[in-house]
Amino acid sequence: MNERSAPGRRPRPGRRPVNRPRKGAPPEITVDTDGVPEVAPVPALRPAVPRRSREQTGPVPTARPWSLREQARRMVAGHGPPTLPFPGSRVLSELSAEDERSVLDLVLRAGEAMVATGAPVGDATAEMLRMADGLGVKNLSVDITFISVTATIDREDDPVTKVRVISTRTSDYSRLTDISRLIGDITNRKLTIPEAHDRLTRILTAPHPYRRAVVTGALGMMAASVALLLGGTWAVALIAAATTMVIDRVLRFLRHRGLPYLFQQVVGSGIATIVAVVLLWGQNTWGWDRAMLPPSLVVASGIVVLLAGLALVGSAEDAIAGFPLTAAARTFEVALSTVGIVAGIGIVLELGRQLGVPLSIGEVGEGVAVHPVVFIGAGAAIAAAWSVASYTRPRTVVLVALVAAAASGAYVVVTALGVSPSGNQFGAGAAAFSAALVIGLLAGVLSERVRVPTMVLSVCGVTPFLPGLSIYRAMYNIVDTGFILEGLDLLVRAGSIGLALAAGVTLGEFLATPLTSEADKWQRRMMARARGSRI
């Protein structure tokens, strides 16, 4: 019997006793003929194979059918990839670190200029990504807020991040158009990095296409066209034009003295209302014909000019495109500026009431039927005048006038069909929405062909339909007659018209996308963001 076997135990028949090392025992050491110790290799342990019991002597059973729980799980569980695309692997460029920093600086300068001139955040983001891709930088991240632009190149060794603060805001559509065309040339690989820097510098330092006196005259023509659009006479148009030009020069003086924009709106609307109060005083003192010189149209014309510079369409596009933070900031800016206009009107109306000047807006404006030809011509003139005041070049001014004329025609048709009867709040909003929808469609179709941003055509096109008269009528009801609820109703009406304009333009641009060339990957990325977080 083996000396390592337990006493009293006999080996199994047919098997030889094997001396196996104990688990954890040290290896066995021997000495060869030269006296060098040798370590015997430890035999590898074979994996344990489970033995079948005597009851399992039959054939191997097949897999059992799915249980009810397993079937229910397979019916509910998803099988495809995630519905939302997640960021993939890092895509590195073939540029050096110095070239990548140069591209990052160029992209930031262009993005800052676009946002400062009023471009929507979604469009600016797509243009910046497209610009970087055209110069060879593939892995760029862009974040735009109301006051800053941040861009990051995600490198393996040393990621680079730069920030630029937006310090100015203006309506300069010629510069915005030139930047858009620059990005188009970069995308088509027509410019190198140094050439792109030089061209962007020339764009940002170029003089305006018009003198300031031309801009003042354009604003006067815009106010005169608004007066005709609302049913006024040529005398009202001349007074409205003169009043608006005075407002422009006064606000320009105050702007250079550092007066905040809110108080500029108060002063501008106050000047327009002062002219209306003087007209009321003259009618009562000298017997002027009230139908010849309705004061309400003078105020309404000035209000439309003050409302034209607000980022109403841009804020709506930011909200729909999936940029709620910037949209909220722009919306608050629009609301605050509108409050300034309302405050200026209310202050002057209250002063006039205290001085004994009887205030009356009459029934002129929304209840007066305007000939369709006059309405369409005035709408085209308003849009063209505002585009000149925003430094749009002459060729684009003609295109803006044609787009506004088509939208005015749509407004006339919807009104004639009875969708917008006089005094119907929702009908007025529907007519404004129809006109804005036409503007968005035309802007989306024509922008790529004429290489002009859609915003230039859409913002100028909706200017004739801004609710200036509704705001004045609301403040008159609140201040003079004491009908607060009716005044608030008119304010809500004005707000609904503004929202209808913004929504119509945005929807029109979206519907125009299939009519243009296929969207690139950057436009598709912005569209995917606009769809929301749940698909």
Image (cartoon, grey):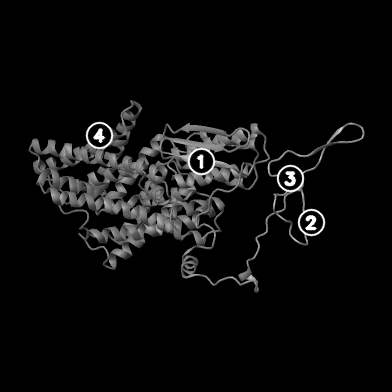
Give the foreground label among 1 and 3.
3
Q: Is residue 459 left or right of residue 300?
A: right
Marks 3 and 4: which is nearer the front?
3
* Residue that numbered label 3 is attached to: 21
Cα–Cα span, label 1 and label 3: 67 Å
From the viewer's side, name the closer residue of 469 and 370: 469
Please state which amino acid type lies under the numbered disc 1: Val
Q: Secondary structure at mark 3?
A: loop
> Tag 3 or tag 2, which sits nearer the N-term?
2
For the question of whether residue 204 can be seen, the reply is: yes
Nearer the observer, 101 or 496: 101
Label disc, if present, on residue 142 of the rendered structure: 1
| Residue mark closest to the camera, 2 vs 3 | 2
Mark 4 to mark 1 CA distance (whole Å): 38 Å
Residue 43 location (% of width, % of height): 77, 47
- Residue pointed to by mark 2: 16
Residue 221 horizontal/vertical position (percent): 34, 45
Q: Which residue is mark 4?
A: 267
